[in-house]
Amino acid sequence: MEYARLGRTALRVSRLCLGTLNLGVRMSMDESLRLMDRAVEQGINFVDTADQYGWQVHRGFTEEVIGEWLALGGGRRDQIVLGTKVFNPMSDRPNDQGLSARHIIAACEASLRRLGTDWIDLYQMHHVDRTAPWEEVWQAMETLVQQGKIRYVGSSNFAGWHLVAAQEAANRRHFMGIVSEQCVYNLVTRHVELELVPAAREYGIGVLAWSPLHGGLLGGALRRLDAGTAVKTAQGRAMVALETHRDTIAEYEKLCADRGADPAEVAMAWVLSRPGVTSIVVGPRTLEQLDGAHRALALRLDDDLLAALDRLFPPIGNGGPGPEAWAW
């Protein structure tokens, strides 16, 4: 396993982060527990979840599944860097959502109970709350840090300028602020290269890429659909994107086949190779998919393959950060 510092912190996290969206939902409890054990055996020390995950059963269910795993003991809690998130509605009550100080603190307490732990390593804002002043947000986060309930604060699905505004407000309070930003980043979706990644690198904020396969689209989608084995690929963002990217995906799968490489592993290796990316968040449903993500760590893409990928999935505008991407 490879490890990297999380942004400007001294905390070291695995370059594969175990995403938990499938735990207990698309997998049985026993399968979920075995998957987490295998991840740790492979050296993954970074686990990501959110308070709302598991909504197909009930909100908070995924945290409860992780709590079951942690309760098995054997030093499991000490072996992982555990991240969860706050923002999404947890009920129909008007104050049971967003980034008010009240909700941040109450949601953290609820997550700790479900997870069965005393602390959260990385507490992430799941989305920007345009109604919450940064002074209020940071006051709540400072309280949780002082109480020992969280160690670091991260963001998710922010724009570049949100990172700047949040970090400058934290700097004025002499608070560490944001140490990571979790954003969608893959060959199909490269918008973050314009401003978000440059802002993150400037402020020492680690980039955690979620959906590196774009919901399975880049994991051999056409092959799986033809074979009748598609699960996640046959729904959601992958199917929507396939309507406009079918020809490109066909070329991509042929390119990978000609190289003797697995499409999913190539897609993950590409994101791992991008500047500023600390970890990719992978959400395997099976041990085999987890093993494939592990193999992607060792896959090095040569210049010819990188150029071919850029031709198939061109960066936005002139490529690279703004303003050069759209101006001079």
Image (tube, rainbow, N blue to C red):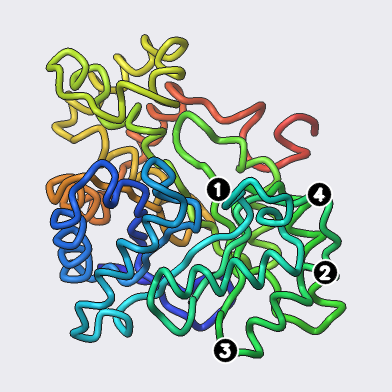
- Hey, what amino acid is under mark 2? Glu
- The residue drawn where x is 48% and y is 57% is 50
- Hey, what amino acid is under mark 3? Gly
The residue where tag 1 is placed is 183
- Hey, what amino acid is under mark 1? Cys
Measured as percent of width and height from the top left, residue 44 is found at 28, 67
The residue where tag 4 is placed is 130
- The residue drawn where x is 61% and y is 71% is 153
- Hey, what amino acid is under mark 4? Arg
On the rendered structure, is 258 left or right of 185?
left
Q: Quadrant of the C terminus?
A: top right
The residue where tag 3 is placed is 148
The image shows residue 303, relative to residue 298, as above or below, that is above
On the rendered structure, is 55 left or right of 300?
right
The residue where tag 2 is placed is 136
Going from the N terminus, do you reach mark 2 or mark 1 first? 2
Of badges 2 and 1, the one in the foreground is 2
Name the secondary structure under disc 4.
Answer: loop
Measured as percent of width and height from the top left, residue 113 is found at 45, 74
Name the secondary structure under disc 3.
Answer: loop
Going from the N terminus, do you reach mark 3 or mark 1 first? 3
Q: State which quadrant residue 193 falls in.
A: top right
Q: State which quadrant residue 48 falls in.
A: bottom left
Between the residue at mark 2 and the residue at mark 3, the CA separation in whole angstroms equals 19 Å
Going from the N terminus, do you reach mark 4 or mark 1 first? 4
